[in-house]
Image: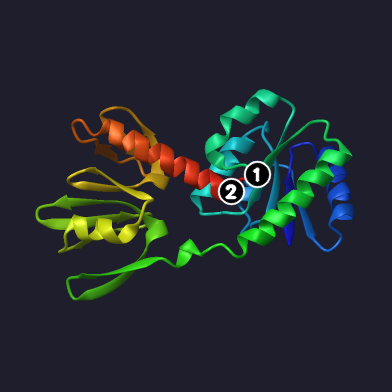
Amino acid sequence: MRIVICDDERRICAILAEKVGKLCPNAEIITYTSGKELLETDELPDILILDIKMPGIDGMEVAKLLRDRDWRKILIFITGEEGQVFNSFDLRAFHFLVKPVADEKLEEVLRSAIKELERMKYLPDRNKKYIDIQSGTAHIRINLLELIYAEVYNRKTIIHTKTKDIEYYGQLSALERIVGKEFYRIHRSYLVNMKYIERYDKANLILVNGDTVPIARRGYEGFLKAYMEYSRTALNLWVD
């Protein structure tokens, strides 16, 4: 088990590392003093204890970037301002520790986090959910976690992933039946992965790749209901 502590104050990093090491003697404890340093490593944590208020890239942005990279493990924020708690709902934080962190509270949260980590081992692995399509003469397997949205254009379906766009002949309704509840048919020509919605209003969705997708006329209420249900389901996967 790898536990990472990220706080711009070296003294706090050292204190927390010592306490966590005593509570979890078999864990690998790694400390970082900046969000940039953490994001540059390829060794992602099982449990991340992350300060919110840091110079440069703050903890909220670090957490968002990690979640965008499909890091799905335990996130524990530490903060000196309790009001920050309400700004991080979408980041699926497991818990919050308020500075100065009491030993009893640290132990309680860590023990709960370890239990949750163990439980997560037995959850279905959504990373293994794929679709297979034929584009021209090529047979392509697409991981649904990489699929941002699909659209119909000029009698073809175009799949937009994190790394590329793929065109093929196929019906959007057929794709809709395969992909599951994480996706929503926002318009007759667009099927969107709700995970990648950056923001929205009554007319459009803005996705994480910067693309804008229109909401069908009179379709906003249906979308809002589906998105709220998706958000509740996603939160239940992360918070005990």
- Residue 194, located in which quarter of the rendered image? top left
Disc 1 residue type (three-letter): Phe
Tell me the residue that label 1 is attached to.
94
Is residue 181 left or right of 37 when viewed as pictured? Answer: left
Question: Element at badge 2?
Answer: helix
Q: Nearer the viewer, residue 119 or 192?
A: 119
Q: Position of residue 140 (x, y in %)?
A: 29, 71
Q: Percent x, y for residue 233? A: 48, 46
- Residue sitting at 41 percent across and 65 percent down? 129
42 versus 203 height, above or below: below
Residue located at (37% from left, 57% from top)? 163
- At 56% from the left and 62% from the top, the residue drawn is 123
Q: Is residue 66 visible?
A: no
- Displayed quadrant of residue 119: bottom right
Instruction: Report which quarter residue 87 is drawn in.
Output: top right
The residue that mark 2 highlights is 238
In this view, 24 is above or below 16: below
Mark closest to the chain's N terminus, 1 or 2:
1
Q: Quadrant of the N terminus?
A: bottom right
**x and y percent of residue 63 in the render?**
59, 43
Q: Is residue 236 visible?
A: yes
Q: Could you tell me the amino acid type at mark 2?
A: Trp
Q: Residue at x 68, y 54 (%)?
A: 116
Q: How many marks?
A: 2
Asked if the residue at tag 2 contacts the one at tag 1, i.e. Cβ–Cβ closer than 8 Å, the answer is: yes
Q: How far across and how far down the image is residue 189, in percent? A: 18, 46
Cα separation between marks 1 and 2:
6 Å
| In-front residue for pair 111/147 | 111
Image vertical order of residue 25 relative to residue 14, above or below: below
